[in-house]
Amino acid sequence: MTTDYDPIADDYKRSKELPWRGFIERFTLLNLMGNIEGKSVLDVACGEGFYTRMLREQGANQVTGIDISQGMIDLARQQEKDNQLGIEYVVEDARELTGEHQYDLVLAAWLFNYARTAEELSQMCQSVAKALKPAGRLVAVNCNPACDFRDAPSYRDYGFETSLVGPWQEGTPITWRLFLSDGHFEIENYHLSQATHDFALKSAGFTTVEWKPPELSPAALKDNAPSHWDTIMNHPPFTFLECIKG
Ligand SMILES: C[S@@+](CC[C@H](N)C(=O)[O-])C[C@H]1O[C@@H](n2cnc3c(N)ncnc32)[C@H](O)[C@@H]1O
C-alpha cells in the first residue's frame, strides 16, 4: 500500500478548512462519539492529527494516533511539539496494528476507503476490533458505498469534485479533487459495497453495525441559505458508521 499522503500532507491539512468539513464531517463525528471524557481513544489513519487533537480537547484521557504516512505523522508530531497535548503518534499500517492496549473507542476517519479489496478491508476491521475493549465502539467517516459515483452531482460549490476511473465495481478507484485558494490536489479512494463492509465488520466481531447519514450543523446556516447544502446532504458522497464490538 502506498504512503501517497507524504507529498500532499500540507495540502490535506489545509483542506480541513473547507466549510463542509466542519459543518458536516466534524459535527456528525462529534455527535456520534458523544461524551468521551476520561476515555482512551485510538485514532486510526489520524493523518496530521486534526481529529486526534480534537479527541484530547474533548476530554479523552489517553489518545494515540497512527497513520501509514510518515509525512502526515511528521506534521502531527510537529504540532504536538508546538502545543503539547500528550498525544502519541506512531507510523503503522492499520491492517497490522501491533499495540497491545485495548481502547474504549476507535475513530477511523477516512480509513476504510483505502481498502482496495474485501481482504484488505477485513484486515483493517480485524485490526481495529482487536484494538478495542469488549463493548468498545468504532466511529468512522468514509467514502459512501451507497453513492453511485457514476451519477454523482457536482460538489464544486463545496470545494471538491469526484470522478471515476474504470467501470463501477468492487475496487473501482474514485478520485477526489479538492480545491484550495491557490490550486487543487487529488486523492484516490476505492469503492467497496456496503455489503462488503457489513460482512468485514461483522466477521471481525462487531455485533452492532449502523450506517449513519451526515448531519448539518445549525451553524452552517449562518452564512448560507439552507438550499446551499441540498446537493451534498441529499447525495452525500461520504457516510458515517457506528459499530460496537461484541
Ligand atoms: C483522508 S486522510 C484522513 C486523515 C484524518 N483521519 C483526517 O480525517 O483528517 C486518510 C489517511 O489515511 C491514511 N492511510 C491510508 N491507508 C492507511 C493504512 N493502511 N493504515 C494507516 N493509515 C492509512 C493516509 O496516510 C491518510 O493520512
Image: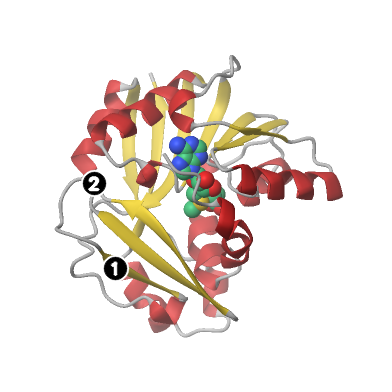
Q: Residue at x 68, y 33 (%)?
A: 63
Q: Can residue 30 be spotted in the picture?
A: no
Residue 240 pos. (x, y %): 39, 49
Residue 191 pos. (x, y %): 26, 50
Residue 57 pos. (x, y %): 73, 46
Residue 173 pos. (x, y %): 28, 55
Badge 2 element:
loop
Q: Which mark is residue 215?
A: none
Q: Is residue 110 above or below residue 131?
A: below
Badge 1 element:
strand
Q: Which residue is nearer to you in this view: 210 or 46?
A: 46
Q: Which residue is nearer to you in this view: 222 or 202?
A: 202
Q: Specify the color scheme.
A: secondary structure
What residue is pinned by disc 1?
Answer: 163
Q: Quadrant of residue 22?
A: bottom right
Q: Quadrant of residue 115?
A: top left
Q: Earlier in the sequence, mark 1 or mark 2?
A: 1
Q: Is residue 60 above or below residue 113?
A: above
Q: Is residue 135 above or below residue 163?
A: above
Mark 1 vs mark 2, CA separation in Å: 14 Å
What residue is pinned by disc 2?
Answer: 171
Q: Can residue 229 be spotted in the picture?
A: yes
Q: Amino acid at mark 2?
A: Gly
In the rendered view of the protein, which quadrant contains the N terminus? top left
| CB contact under 8 Å: marks 1 and 2 | no
User: What is the total number of numbered labels drawn onto the structure image?
Assistant: 2
Q: Amino acid at mark 1?
A: Ser
From the viewer's perspective, tell me whether residue 77 is left or right of residue 168.
right
